[in-house]
Image: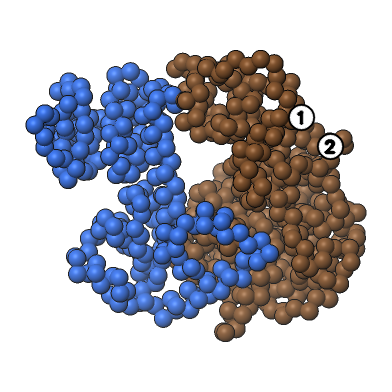
Amino acid sequence: MVYYIYDGSYIGFLTAVFDCFDLKDKAVKVVTKEQYSPSFFDEGFEIISDSVKAKRVLNGLNKKLKKAQVNDFYCVFLSEDLQAVQYTFDLICELFRQGADILENYGDEKVVYFAKTLKSVGREKHRMKAFVRFKKATDGMYFAIIDPDFNVLPLIFRFFKNRYADQRWLIYDVKRNYGLMYTLQQIVEVKLLPLEKQALATTEVIAFDEDEVYYQNLWKQYYQSTNIEARRNMKLHLQYVPKRYWKYLVEK
Amino acid sequence: MDRIQEKLMILADAAKYDVSCSSSGSKRKNKGGIGDASASGICHTYTEDGRCVSLLKILLTNHCIYDCAFCVSRKSNDVKRAAFTVEEVVEITMNFYRRNYIEGLFLSSGIFKNADFTMERLMRIVKKLRTEERFHGYIHLKTIPGASEELIKEAGLYVDRMSINLELPTEAGLKLVAPEKDHESVRKPLAFVQNHIKELQSESALIKHKPLFVPAGQSTQMVIGATPESDYQIMSVADEFYKNYQLKRVYYSGYIPINSDNVLLPQVGTQPPLIRENRLYQTDWLLRFYDFKLDEILNPQFQNLDMDIDPKLGWALRNPQFFPIDINTADYKQIIRIPGIGRQSAMKIIKARKFGKLREYQLKKIGISYNRAKFFMICADSPFTLGEMSMMNVKQSILQFGNSKYKNTIPENQLSLF
Ligand code: SF4
């Protein structure tokens, strides 16, 4: 068994795939620096992220698969789930050796787990598109905080960019401590200092637009009025909006 | 409470009986403004009744010159009345949209003065949103029966979806509770819009930038359980409307009693027929996506759906000669007819079996509902059984197994269970 230790980035991960072929290693486990604990029996090999190598792996995948399928690997990678990342690694290696149709083998545990994770990430991605609630600051910036189960911000920012093309916005992932900001020209990554992040919790760092609370109240009113009491069904309600998402929702 | 908030309370409350909240099916892209309706629909939240909230669904006004007995806004009903101005609707829509509360607007109205007067107001709202606010989000407009074709045609250039409700499944039913209304005034605009969509399609080869015209198509809604139609009658109407007007959706809305004066209608306090509504949606789904013909599920001999089991299972139990289906050799169309197997799992099965015959443990992982499906299929290691199990027993076992699931069936608009 060889441990490939990478920096946690997707480029690092793809570099690992490249090196695995280059070095003709067989039983490889991919781990990040944080996940790795050295042992006597296994070898540890540090992967140096290399965008040229990563690009070559992507090119290889693009030749064998449709664009959306290639993107699936990235989505599952963003689950940050150790098992799913390992299977992704194994599947990419297998696919280069045996051909793309191994991905359709739903009789194989790896494929099933991969598909399941892909679905979970997709669901979280969809939920974030739905549950992000912007608050308008005095300077006209629309601001939202998220804390998703998976690292889905890279998967949703284009959606917001297309949609909110004429307003400046910032979506901040407090769990992973980074955010993406749209400046009307481009998307930039922002990172808050620990102190700023703390201050976020109190919401006092941002001065909100004078109409902000007014529209929040209107929305709450709408939410109540559109409900049909005779059809009340809390079980179904909770299935669609699990409690852990309530913190996002103005109307809750 | 501020006046706008009060209006919103009244006019959202009056609009909520329209069940459609779909925001999918359009292809409107953001062109130098705000909004994008090209993605598949998004539910931004859910009400406590478990319905999706995707659009800001409001009436322009609940003043109405008609007196349809099944409707809260009917003239004779003693409710608070209100009316938004054009500007107010635009402002609320934009501010909600910019905060990512909604996908867009669902606008409808009671009829004040006359059809065209009302329609003209609605038109001004959608036009302002598109041209002045440069809003490219989703707009669903419920057209007013009797409005002029010019107005409908112009509105069609700004909206994504249009709808006009049948209200009651049959003309006879309608006459009982809304004598001033008829189905003809629904058919006419549906046909008019549909023809215009087709015309534009056939011209499209000639015109470079063909205008978007109702890109998400049309829909309608029927109220279920207010009048005594059978499920067969209801679904026959739906089937006909899907075929003749290429509707994107037919909605079935379980009647919620709101009228104590009319003795023909279910009285206030009666439970809305939620399970029945669910079964109708399941049937609708089977017709549109599972390649079932209506008479396989409902026909003059079998007029009403089972309430305790879903229509696909019901069909399977009535047709034992189709089963068991061999999962390793049957084609897709056969596999999706197996109770407990949906379209996605069927696709996976077809792909996976290329790698070798599928066994029970694999099928369980693929995501089918094995405990239901097992009675209707065989796989590589299915135990050899002597003789056939009677369908009566199958139903018993399934009902027993899925006891909680079937006894407290949850009505859903979007169904995944078969
Ligand atoms: S015309 Fe429409 S709003 Fe008016 S009473 Fe009839 S259903 Fe209600």
In the current view of this chain or complex, which residue is farthest to the left? A40
**Nearer the observer, disc 2 or disc 1?**
1
Chain letter of mark 1 equals: B
Residue A126 x/y as whole percent: 45, 50
Residue B292 x/y as whole percent: 71, 32
Q: Secondary structure at mark 2?
A: loop
Q: Is residue B201 visible?
A: no
What tint does the image give chain B? Answer: brown
Q: As shown in the figure, which amino acid type bears the numbered disc 1?
A: Arg
Chain in blue on the image: A
Which callout, 2 or 1, points at the residue further toward the start of the chain?
Answer: 2
Residue B126 x/y as whole percent: 61, 64
Q: What's the residue at 60%, 83% (across, down)? A: B3
Chain letter of mark 2 equals: B
Q: Secondary structure at mark 1?
A: helix
Q: As shown in the figure, which amino acid type bears the numbered disc 2?
A: Phe
Label annotation for residue B340: none
| Quadrant showing the N terminus of chain A | top left
CB under 8 Å between discs 2 and 1: yes
Residue matched to label 1 = B318
